[in-house]
Image: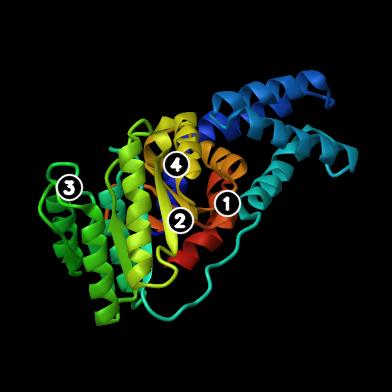
Amino acid sequence: MGFFSRLRDSLTKTKESMIRNIETVVRGYAKIDEDMYDDLEAVMLTSDIGVETTEYLLDKIREGVKSKEIKEGNDVVPYLEKCIVALLEENKVPLPEREGTEVIFIVGVNGVGKTTTIGKMAKYYKEQGKSVMMAAGDTFRAAASEQLTIWAERTDVPIVKHQEGADAAAVVFDATASAKAKGIDILLVDTAGRLQTKSNLMEELKKMARIASRNIEGAPQETLLVLDATTGQNAVSQAKLFGEVVPLTGVVLTKLDGTAKGGVILSVKRELGVPVCWVGVGEGIDDLRPFDAAKFADALFDRNVEQREQEDE
């Protein structure tokens, strides 16, 4: 099964809770009126799209009605799909090609799947012909280094680690120096699962970034926040707090396969203004891929299925 098919399957619960309910609402109205908008609002809120993003999408639908692109209820869902793609692709700027090592910090609270994400990203980048190194920057949690080592062995990439309780910034210093000397393309840095109340850990993250830039100019080039889709709007709250401390360049949304709250992906983009860069749809090593807004919408709305599946073959 290709990744598109896995993505489509993973969105089944979200489709049932959001898209199917929206379709039911619009079919029930002979004309578009305020009662329909109220019902649409209720469906979107229960799908964990969030208040702000729900209002945004409803405003877009009103614009569609005013411009005559939406003439009847059956026009709402196709129009909504276009709005969702536009939202997810908004301000999307590809990272420039650069020479030397690209340092990617992986941040987030405990339990969202940071270590697993690093392993899957390593596998993906290797398949793209990139050389990869891991840095075990989570020296705070017991066995974090050992877990990352397992992924390093599984993906056959080198890892830089120190003993438990060591200075995480020292790990980053050694890793960036080693990656630069060896001409590594991608350095993936694990970090401790930071609770927002633990300001000392947040300060540690800032220190790690400063140290990384001493060995590699501009590092970290990316700071990706891993979010668990099953937590819904709580994921957005986490992201806002992290964004206040470190400059996030993107989000990795994991566990889409286990939730009906896939609509949170819209809130993440709308409320944070940072792109969703990767999505995870399962526990397999190939179940994490760079995010594609058009493919996501096709999977969510069951459109262009045959074409997408052929592209995956």
Q: Could you tell me which secondary element the residue under label 1 belongs to?
A: helix
Vertically, is 96 above or below 220? below
Task: Estimate the x, y position of residue 287 in percent, counting from the top left.
Answer: 34, 54
- Whether residue 282 is visible, yes or no, is no
* Residue at left offset 34%, top offset 64%: 212
Residue 240, image x and y in percent? 51, 38
Q: Earlier in the sequence, mark 1 or mark 4?
A: 4
How far apart are labels 3 and 4 at the CA level? Answer: 21 Å
Residue 26 in which image quadrant? top right
Q: CA distance from mark 1 to mark 4?
A: 30 Å
**Quadrant (top left/top right/bottom left/bottom right) for the C terminus:** bottom left
Q: Amino acid at mark 1?
A: Asp
Which x, y percent locates residue 190?
Answer: 28, 54
Task: Tell me what residue is drawn at x 26 percent, y 73 percent.
Answer: 177
Q: Are marks 1 and 2 in contact (CB under 8 Å)?
A: yes
Residue under pointer 4: 242
- Provide the residue designation for mark 1: 298
Counting residues from the start of the chain, the first of labels 3 and 4 encountered is 3
**Which of the marked residues, 2 or 3, is nearer the chain's N terminus?**
2
